[in-house]
Image (spheres, grey):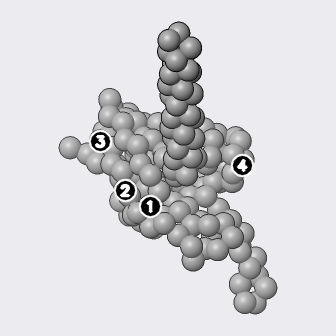
Amino acid sequence: MRRSIALTLTALVLAAAAGAGVAAYRWARGQSSSLPEVSAYSVGHTTRVGPYFYCSVVDLNDCSRAQSEGAVRVNDREPVQLSVPRAISDAPWRLLKVYEDERNTTTTMFRPGSHLAVTIPTTDAQRGRVVGVVVQLMTLVRDQNDEVFDLPHAEWSVRLTRG
């Protein structure tokens, strides 16, 4: 009788271990396939947003186009704290600050590993109010004329709202 109890307990322990292993594998697999998110914080409000689009670096026609756009409430005195995960910061990335007059949009490039966060003033004396920020992951492409230039293969968008 003791032997049958021991065998039953052993079978239950093995089944539980196998189930935990399968669950851990599925969880880990699901985590690695999720797309990176950026976060923006200002005046006590935080938003996390996935990519507006995310394309394969090798094939810019192979894209996930969720068209997600975050929004964070701001005022004219407090800055926005923008944070990016290592999946973005370990690559060359670009920050666009979009102003009320889109012609005043500014672009800043960041080298791989240089920044996980950026502080962004919500107003500029010459350009006016910032109404949005865009994070882009860049890749080099060659056109039919053999010209090489950079294009975004992924983009995250956060709208700044007042009120």
Q: How crowded is mark 2: few (under 14 residues within 10 Å), some or many (20 or more)?
A: some
Residue 150 at what x, y percent from top left?
A: 68, 69
Left or right of 147: which side holds 72?
left
The residue identified by callout 1 is: 52
Q: Are marks 1 and 3 in contact (CB under 8 Å)?
A: no
Please tell me which residue is depicted at 62% across the width and 67% down the height of the picture: 56
Q: Is residue 143 left or right of residue 86?
A: right
Q: Quadrant of residue 47?
A: top left
As shown in the figure, which amino acid type bears the numbered disc 4?
Arg
How much space separates mark 4 and mark 2, taking CA atoms? 25 Å
**Which image quadrant is residue 44 in?**
top left
Circle 4 residues within 10 Å: few <14, some 14–19, many ≥20: few
What residue is shown with label 3? 73
Disc 3 residue crowd, few under 14, some 14–19, many 20+, Cα 10 Å: some
Q: Is residue 151 visible?
A: yes
Q: Earlier in the sequence, mark 4 or mark 3?
A: 3
Q: Residue furthest right?
A: 146
Determine the residue located farthest toward the bottom in the rendered image: 145
The residue lying at 57 percent from left, 77 percent from top is: 61
Circle 2 is placed at which residue position? 69
Three-letter code, disc 3: Arg
Asked if the residues shown at circle 2 and circle 1 are in contact, with their CB atoms under 8 angstroms apart, the answer is yes
Say what amino acid the circle numbered 2 marks. Answer: Glu
Q: In which quarter of the image is the C terminus?
A: top left
Residue 117 position within the rendered picture, expressed as x and y whole percent measured from the top left: 56, 37
Tell me the amino acid under the disc marked 1: Tyr
